[in-house]
Amino acid sequence: MKRKIIRHESLGGRYRSMDFEWPDDGAKPGQFVMVRISDSTDPLLRRPMSIANLEDGLMSIIYNVAGRGTSLMAEKRAGEAVDVLGPFGTSFDPPKNASHLLCVMGGVGAAPFLFLKKRNKDRKMVGFYGAANKDGLGISIPMDEMHFATEDGSVEKRGLVTDVLLEHPAMKNRDAHIMACGPKGMLRAVDEICVKHKISGELSLEERMGCGFGVCLGCAVETDAGNKRACVDGPVFKAGTIRWRT
C-alpha cells in the first residue's frame, strides 16, 4: 500500500530515518514492515524494516544504507510515496514482573527498541549498544541507562557489547529479562548468556525475507520445535529455543 513520506533524513553516518503516514495503531514493538524499494521490478524483492515508532498517524523506520537497494531508497524525498506492507511478525513481550529489562542491540538492531521504550515509558530499561566503531552507533536511544561498546574502542568500552552486559549488576538477578536485536553472532552470544545464567530472554532475528508472510519459506530458522519461519513465527524468538548452525 502506498504511504506518503512526511520526513526522510540522515541520522549521521550510514543510518537514515523515514516517517510516513500510517493511520492504524495496531503495530507492536518488534514487528516489521516490508518496504518496496522502487516502483520498478528492480530490485524485485521488498526489504524487511523494523518499526522504530508509531504515533500520531506516523510510522517510523530506520535503515542502514548498505547496498544498491537501500541506496535507491535513500533517494526518496518527503512528499513522495513509499509502498509498504505490514505490520508482520511477533513482538517483544517482556514479563510484567521482570526486575530489570536489559536491551542488547547491535547496529541498526537498535531501531525496535525506540518503539519498545515508547510503549513502556513507565518501565526502567537499560540499553547496551555495540558496533564496530562510533559510526555504527548512530541511532539515539532514550533508555533510562545506556552503555556502549565498540570493537575499536572509539566509544566507551573496547570489545563486545555482551562483555558490557555481563558486567552489569542486574545480571545477578534471575528475574531480569534480556531482549536483543542485531547481528547473528551477537544474538547467539546473548542466547548463550541467557541459558548459562538462567535468565529469560527474547531474540529478534535479522533474516533475509522474500515475502514477509510465510509463503516463500525463504527465512527458515531451525528451533527445538522444528523449522520455523522468521517472518511469521518470529522475528522474535524465546532465548534457548534456536538451534544455531556452526
Image (spheres, rainbow, N blue to C red):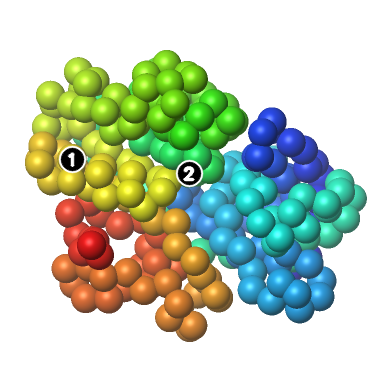
Density class for disc 2 (Cα within 10 Å; few <14, some 14-19, many ≥20) is: many
Instruction: Decide which of 71, 57 is in the foreground and name it.
Output: 71
Q: Residue at x 37, y 22 (%)?
A: 158
Can residue 125 be seen? no
- Give the left or right position of residue 190, taking residue 18 as reference: left
Q: Separation of disc 1 and disc 2 at Cα?
A: 18 Å
Q: Where is residue 236 in the image (x, y as percent from the top left)?
A: 36, 55
Q: In this view, does 176 lie above or below 214?
A: above
Looking at the rendered structure, which numbered label has been put on residue 201? none
Mark 1 vs 2: CB contact within 8 A? no
Instruction: Decide which of 220, 177 is in the foreground and name it.
Output: 220
- Give the left or right position of residue 222, taking residue 74 as reference: left
Residue placed farthest to the right in the image? 79
Q: Position of residue 206 (x, y in %)?
A: 44, 56
The residue beneath circle 1 is: 193
Q: Residue at x 78, y 67 (%)?
A: 38
The residue beneath circle 2 is: 109
Q: Where is residue 9 in the image (x, y as percent from the top left)?
A: 77, 38
